[in-house]
Image (cartoon, rainbow, N blue to C red):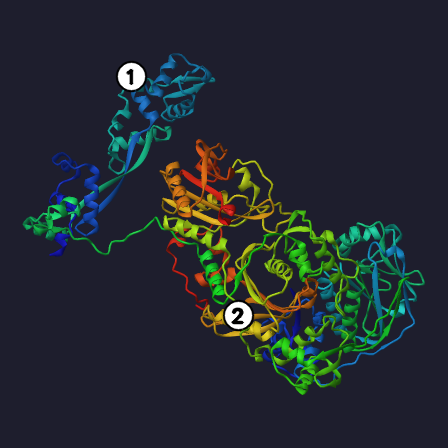
Amino acid sequence: MVYIYAKHSELNKYIGKKLTVQEIENTLIDLGMDIKGKSDEKDIELKIEITAEKMEFVSSIGIARAIKHYLEIEKEIETYEIKKGKNTIIVDRSVQKVRPKIVGAIIRDFEVTEENLEEIIKIQEKIHDSFGRNRKKISIGIYPVKKIEFPIIYKAEKPEKIKFRPLESEVEMNGNEILEKHETGKKYAHLINESDVYPVLIDSKNQILSMPPIINSYETGRVVPGKCDLFIDCTGYNLTHLDNILKVIVTTLLEMDGKAESVIVDYDEEKYELNLDNYKDEIDIDFVNDWIGIKINKEEAEKLLKRMCYKVIKSKENKFEIEIPPYRSDVWHDVDIADDIARAYGYNNIIPKIPEISSSGEHLPKSLKREEISKNLVGMGFLELYTYMLTSTDIQYTKMKIKEKKCVKIIDSAEEGINTVRTLILPENLVALNINRKCGYPQKVFENGFVIEEDENEEHVCVCIAEPKSNYTKIKEVFDMLVKMNGWGITLKEKEYNFLIRGRSASILYKEKEIGFIGEIHPEILNNFGLIVPVSCFEINIKEIIEE
Amino acid sequence: MHEIYKLHPLERKMLPLLHKNINEILLKTKMNEMEIHQGIQMLAEKGYTKIKVNEKELILLSELGEKYIEEEMPEIKFLKQLDKPKEIKNIKMDNQGEFSSTLGYLKQNKYIEIIQGKLNITEEGNMFLEKNIDNPLKKFQNNDIEIKKMDSEMLKIYNQYKDRNFFKIIKKKEFNYEITEEGKKISEKLKKFNKNLIEEVNENVIKNKEWKNSEFRHYEINIETKLENVGRRHPTIEANNILRDIFIEMGFKEMEGPMLEAAFWNMDIMWIPQDHPARDEQDTFYVEGNFELDKSLIKRIKKIHEDGIKRTHTEKEGWSEEIASKKLLRTHSTATSFRKLVELSKKEKLENGKYFYIANNFRNEKVDATHLAEFYQAEGFIIGDNLSLADLMGFVKEYYAKLGITKIKFKPTFNPYTEPSMEAHYYDPKMKKWYALINSGIFRKETLEPLGIHKTIIAWGMGASRIATLLTGKNSMKEITGATCDFNWLKERENLKRNIVR
């Protein structure tokens, strides 16, 4: 979940009109965002949830831009100009194995204020935490151009050779020291410390500008209030992602102030240069009407497109040639454009219609058979349980004195006490019997559920009788009746199990294959589960027998 | 007076005997103590007797105290050894534990003194020996001495010896009863009542037509009962069945799929990029091991992830088969929908149809009131020739109506595999809130083209566990699932109604 915090006054400032909080909220929802919280202050701060594909909403500027067009407060769709610059970033091969991609651009004549500097840092941090996946996918650096002598080299060096004074430090440190001692270094060390070389951005005067994705240099990486030129770099692994986010950052900054200038990024095989041209595409309004289930005409369509910041260049009958803003990296096909038109139309203005597909309903035969078994057991006075499949090997094997069999091994569970998926339902039912030991006896319970054996779903039925006089006869009565009701061709054979009393247990066989067990639970096992009444039980894998 | 007819045989027996105490009753009648208590209890419940339970604190001799009744008191034994002055270490006592308390007692009473490191018996000590008093503990041999009722002499002895563990105090409940005014009234009436009432219907009563000459004892028709043996379905399973029934009513066919999946089926095949946040361990239960994947399917999926279609933004640097083959517990049952689509796409002709699955899914999250690590989703999709967002809304509206929901709000959202994507919220007038229940959309071509599917498919997932919580009237999913469910609630809860709105 990505949350953007925006104050009411701030949004209105960028929208260019005084809207009420309710009006803003309604528009945000129509646009596909959600309000997850509101502060109590006089200037209400909204906690806005944005979706993963909308990078342009990473700041209140982007959000306000969408709102003002949506509500037709602003009817002129922005064009973002970028001048072709002559500065270059040379990408050295050494950086390929550790953090291969970089993009960059310059914003000229930007008046930095305390306020907008705070906003810029906020945006940078938000991108790092969300779309940047904690700096792994995207890491952004911002520098005053006047401190930099282009061309810049982006390469990777041995950490001992990287020496500079990082931001928030009094002293010079080398690459290793930064990762070991600097706050930010320690936090993000894992992104580069497996490599024997670390990325570094150096200018022509051999000044280190930064060690991406960790930290800028104090000398060259500090932006202070005043009119200046800003250099922005983004490093990561995927050029398309970086290009997308750079477009968002630059267009957002241009909304504040300044003029954009491209920087040539020279990879041997190709060159990258930021381009703020609109994407060009076509859309057929007939397609939109079919895909969404509405009936709009050309004029209406054009109006809706404009409200979503699309420019309509040409139209022939119901086919439009359109232009999409550069910050929209999520619009790939007609369906994406159709969705935007639907958002402008208003989802709740669409008239629902019942899909005209004629088909007859069908249960899976095994579902019906499973249901019958459950009903049979309820008819015998048994209470159905529903316990979890996620459990621990301690409950499934150690407490049961069963040798651990091949089972699902969970790698890293957030919830403590979970490290496997059950292969038997019985232990989980014993836990339930213990938790309910204060309820009156007899306790006759069953569960008709799933386990995972050999990586596959298996259907098991487990039945337990817990009461002072519980014994083998009682459970066999139930077992025999269940077999009769379901017409199963199964037999019993004496067999010893560690968790059942010797001489009072048997295996359940189907076509000579063991599919379950029946017997009285051994007191040692009862003790392990905190039970002090006898329990007799059976558990049977019904997968094959219901497939008949 | 009907009340006479309601008297249980035990009550009829006990009423005339209430002026006697239990011992007298035991002697005079053939009743045993349990019957007497039961009879009195029953009469008390009807208000005919009043029971008073007195708790008494009684003094008894402890084991140690009993021991010294037989033998000599330890202080006598001690003093007798002081015919000559002796060092402490030369005094012999049976019980070393008694040594210090006996020594303390003797010192306290000045029966001994220490001179030049040796113990000597004093004048008082000699006088004490000569007295040769009877063991004072013998006075406590009668078992019924109440602490409150000890006389001063006994109190003195008690205080002298209480610190030496010779006594123990027990609490005894005394059971006293007396007849009430109501009891007296009905007793009078009983004296004049000589009808014999039949207790139970049995073979003889029927065969001998005994009812012709007798009446039956009347019962208290409002007695409190508790039925222990109750067989019942689990409410979560019942709720899932309701959802299943609704799908069947709407013409859907049930499908199913494995819970242990390859990342390929859970994510790659539906256009979730390999660096999507949902693939982090934070949300997914990764499991040791890898699955073998279908070669031709991998080829097609790899191509779409790397090249996309037209302007799709893609991975470009390479889609990894190793990542796709990782084993995990499915996070959503959309994996099964895609398995079904692959199966259907292999047929000669892809038929239109409706499919659903009530599936158990797994998310690697910490469990709290609104999140479970395993939970049910009601998954489904409809294949059609020209389905639209309006059709999806129509389906949702119809399904929700069968759960008693009429006020719905649709909201745009985002899924990597559908476009448009839509949430449906419903309004609960009692809670005065909107709730989200369903995430849905139309599958985008990046998901369908590799499978050779050119029809429109609308699909959704509903929080079935959340719906189950609402249907049972509980507040959190945790209360209605797992081993912690209370058996009494499982037995006694109200039947589920097909109505989410409270």
Tell me, for residue B130, which label it has, or none: 1
Q: Which three-letter amino acid code belongs to the residue tagged 1?
A: Glu
Mark 2 nearby-residue class (10 Å; few <14, some 14–19, many ≥20): few
Labels 2, 1: front one: 2
Quarter where residue B324 is shown: bottom right
Q: Residue furthest right?
A: A205
**Quadrant into which the N terminus of chain A falls:** bottom right
Q: Chain of mark 1?
A: B
**Residue B394, disc:** none
Front residue of A308/A14: it is A308
For marks 2 and 1, give the CA distance.
Answer: 115 Å
Residue B288 pos. (x, y %):
66, 46
Left/right placement of residue B69 relative to residue A520 reads left
- Whether residue B333 is visible here, answered yes or no, is yes
Location of residue B338 (image quadrant) = bottom right
Residue B102 pos. (x, y %): 39, 23
The reply to whether the C-beta atoms of the residues labelled 2 and 1 are less than 8 Å apart is no
Q: Which residue is mark 2?
A: A358
Same chain assignment for discs 2 and 1? no
Vertical order, B314 against A43 (above or below): above
Count of picture labels: 2
Give the residue type at disc 2: Ser
